[in-house]
Amino acid sequence: MTAPTPRRIYQNHHLDNTRWAHVHARDDDIVVVTAYKSGTTWTQNIVLHLIHQDLELREISKHSPWIEMRIRPVEDMAARVAAIETRRCLKSHMPFDGLPFSHTTRYVMPGRDPRDVFMSFWNHYSAYMPKMYADLNDTPGRVGPPLPRCPEDIRACWRDWITRGWFEGDSEGWPFWSNMGLVQSWWDQRALPNVLMIHYDDMLADLPREIARIAAFLGIDAGPDLIADIAEATSFKAMKARAMALDTTAEDQFAGGAGRFIFKGTNGRWRDVLDADDLALYEAAAARVLSPDCRAWLEGRGPA
């Protein structure tokens, strides 16, 4: 059975969501979907441990592929996804209208305060090495302009990121794709029984509780001992120590390698970087993109 096609096409230097046409849906599929830098790899790792009921470390790109990442040949991606014999955990960075939504698929959506997202985004983008730019910009099939080099000034990067959008109708997230708009699109679907919103702050505060929530949502039987073991195995300290094994492709793409990809895992660093003018831009962006309840949830002031 093939899932329905996305309602909107998203294609740029990173993304090509038409690749979902090569993924034949299974009734028990799981998709971890985020804007970026909101606990994606963390959540994928948790879900893989729950699926396999063990603590074995698995390379994320092989066992939980990012479907829209266009620099990997689509044939290889499709073959890798089809070859997974267990229940599948797939990765997406798509808003709700960019995925071939299925009522039998389970969607897990981690969210995070946009200001914290930016700090992790800056660490990520500013670490891109020449090979990463070459892969993104020179791989055949790119739609639209090339990805520009990251500014050397973090606040210049902030001003672009918070005031400009890459895709038509977006007004933040440049030069990647929308952050707040993507979260809002899934927030609007949160009442669906196959959509689970989880928060980065809640994972930091009580990881075993959040793992238990994810397991229950996925219909996976996980006892207290397994949950405690998974929480220990997926703590930030443990994942940082095993970063290279989680992503073996990072060494020639990021300055600092996988250790830069899994960096600090902390919140609030924006307070030492963004000034009053910068935060005024955030206020304007949040007001135009986020509903009040979604904003409160992202900022840790309200429930999902």
Image (cartoon, rainbow, N blue to C red):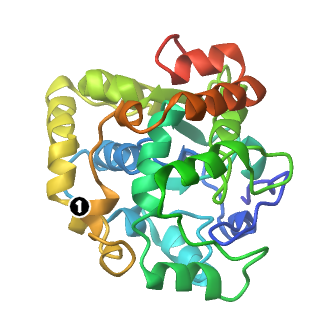
Please give the residue where the numbered disc 1 appears in the rendered image: 243
Q: Amino acid at mark 1?
A: Ala
| Among the 4 quarters of the image, the one containing residue 147 | bottom right
Q: Is residue 6 above or below residue 216?
A: below
Within 10 Å of disc 1 (Cα), the crowding (few <14, some 14-19, many 20+) is: many
Residue 269, image quadrant: top left
One can see residue 87 in this view: no
User: Which quadrant of the structure image shows residue 202?
Assistant: top left
Any part of residue 135 in sight: yes
Q: Is residue 67 above or below residue 117?
A: below
User: Camera-side residue: 265 or 249?
Assistant: 265
Q: Residue at x 66, y 72 (%)?
A: 13
The N terminus lies in quadrant: bottom right
Decide which of 5, 160 is in the foreground and name it.
160
Q: Secondary structure at mark 1?
A: helix
Q: Residue at x 44, y 36 (%)?
A: 116
Q: Is residue 10 above or below residue 185?
A: below
Q: Position of residue 26 (x, y in %)?
A: 60, 53
Q: How many marks?
A: 1
Of 292 and 199, which appears nearest the observer? 292
